[in-house]
Amino acid sequence: MGELVFKQRKRNWCGLPWSFTIYSFDEERLFIERGVFTKREDEVRLYRILDISLQRSFIQRIFKMGTITVDSSDKTMKNFELKNIKNSKEVKEQLSQLVEEERQRKRITGREFMGDYDHDGFDDDHYDHDDHY
């Protein structure tokens, strides 16, 4: 794992970090770690992120927080939220910039995201395995 450029604990409604969920990302991956006794860590490669949006409720704006919604082409983490993030506007912009940099570095173009395709370019969701044996 590369050096983390962002790490923050999910916060409660008033901005206190009383949660066992930790959000972080480095220059290649975004991580969500959950749990106390049983830890679960999910990750998504930044180049797989398709869209990032920010929502800020009235209460979140009072406490200078927001929720970042991420849509990706990852199989296990398609759509997810980074909830109650402090300085959410800056974090969203930082994440967005890293996503673009990683896509350029890997030479990923928009056509890779036109469907739900793996690296082989084949749409596994529309493949009937029994018809091709």
Image (spheres, helix red, strand yellow):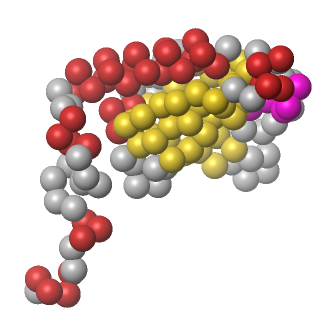
Q: Quadrant of residue 89?
A: top right
Q: Is residue 88 visible?
A: yes
x, y percent for residue 106 = 21, 27
Q: Is residue 90 left or right of residue 26?
A: right
Q: Residue at x 20, y 87 (%)?
A: 130
Residue extending furthest toward the front: 58
Query: Is most of the magenta stretch helix, strand or loop?
Result: loop
Q: Is residue 89 left or right of residue 11?
A: left
x, y percent for residue 18 = 86, 32
Is residue 12 shown in magenta?
yes
x, y percent for residue 53 = 52, 30
Is residue 1 shown in magenta?
no
Q: Is residue 45 visible?
A: no
**Which of these two is toward me, 131 or 51?**
51
**Which of these two is toward me, 114 or 23?**
114
**Which of these two is toward me, 126 or 42?**
126
61 shown above or below 37:
above
Q: Residue at x 36, y 47 (%)?
A: 73
**Which of these two is toward me, 39 or 104?**
104
Q: How many marks?
A: 0
Q: Residue at x 23, y 46 (%)?
A: 114
Query: Which segment did they paint magenta?
Result: 10-14
Q: Quadrant of residue 80?
A: top right
51 shown above or below 42:
above
112 shown above or below 104:
below
x, y percent for residue 127 = 21, 73
Position of the N terminus, as image quadrant, is: top left
Q: Quadrant of residue 113?
A: top left
Q: Residue at x 74, y 47 (%)?
A: 35
